[in-house]
Amino acid sequence: MFFVDLKYEKQLMFSKRVDYDVEHELHMHDWLEINVLLENKAIFRLLNSDIAGEAGDVFVFRPFEPHYNLVQEPGRPIVWILVLFSPSIVKLIPQGYQLLYPFYSDSVSPHIEKSSPYAALIHQAAIRAYEEEQRKAPGWETQQFMYFIDILIQIYRYTLERQAETGSTIVDSGMILVLEYLLQHMTEEIDIQVLIQLYGKGKTRFYHDFRSLMGVSPNQFIHRLRVQIAMHLLDTTDRPVTSIGFECGYNSIHYFNKVFKEHRGVSPSQYRSRTEYWTE
């Protein structure tokens, strides 16, 4: 497995991809990723599972989740639209942080089958967004961003609907408020009592439901977000590691180094000086 160092000037990227691989090493990255399968059958490979997909399907890969798209039928290459974006882009969307919930929760399968009306809407928006960039008519970036917002909304609505249908833990408005608060204040000192009050169901229930939905504790979730920001700053600035640690919410450089290494396997300084990718 290897980490891919994705460096883009823009926070949002649409591209059309073609792949012939039937086997490939898994990779991961810190961007949020949406795959919209256009042609032939694919295998969406995760660390512990393979999910078969066909043209019309949509697949959501979560940040730091090892994955790769593979051809299901040798000789029939898969074609898909790849959407990559930084979570910071949702600052431009009213209540945009709510739309990131599906990318951080493990409560619903990331596979949206073509039979779902949400998959059809996502396909339409992704194709039009890609075509806007190819034509580059006046105002294309604004139009593309509007299609992108529509994609996020459809994924969000699909996630909430599936939770209700399957009887899995449903994300109520209180947990959405908690997630939004964490994403908005991730680099600040977080008072857990504020999160419990936002959820409104008591301390024990809050911790249980948060872990059920996110797969980690509130503190682990905060560290994961902070490390993601730190990686971006290490990639795109020449600021000292100490300064970056402070900006990401760590008052102790020793603790920042410790947390970063726990998540990435290397120290912040080693991460900055790495090659294009590093293996695990």
Image (spheres, grey):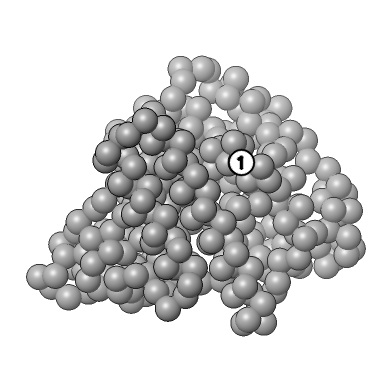
The residue furthest top is 239
Height in image: 58 above or below 6?
below
The x and y percentages for residue 88 are: 56, 37
Q: What is the secondary structure assignment of the residue under circle 1? A: loop
> Looking at the image, which residue is at 48% across and 72% down?
117
Q: In this figure, which residue is indicated by the disc labeled 1?
A: 93
The x and y percentages for residue 173 are: 77, 60
The x and y percentages for residue 191 are: 83, 43
Which is nearer the eye, 229 or 172?
A: 172
> Looking at the image, which residue is at 46% across and 49% down?
147
Whether residue 158 is visible here, answered yes or no, is yes
Q: Is residue 155 left or right of residue 37?
A: right
Height in image: 148 above or below 112?
above
> Looking at the image, which residue is at 60% across and 20% down?
243
> Looking at the image, which residue is at 88% across and 65% down?
201
| Res. 104 image quadrant | bottom right
Which is nearer the eye, 205 or 135?
A: 135
Q: Is residue 271 left or right of residue 77?
A: right
Instruction: Point out the image quarter for the N terminus.
Output: bottom left
Mark 1 residue crowding within 10 angstroms, few (<14) / some (14–19) / many (20+):
few
Type of amino acid at the residue the image marks with label 1: Ile
Q: Is residue 44 left or right of residue 176?
A: left
Height in image: 164 above or below 143?
below
The x and y percentages for residue 227 are: 56, 39
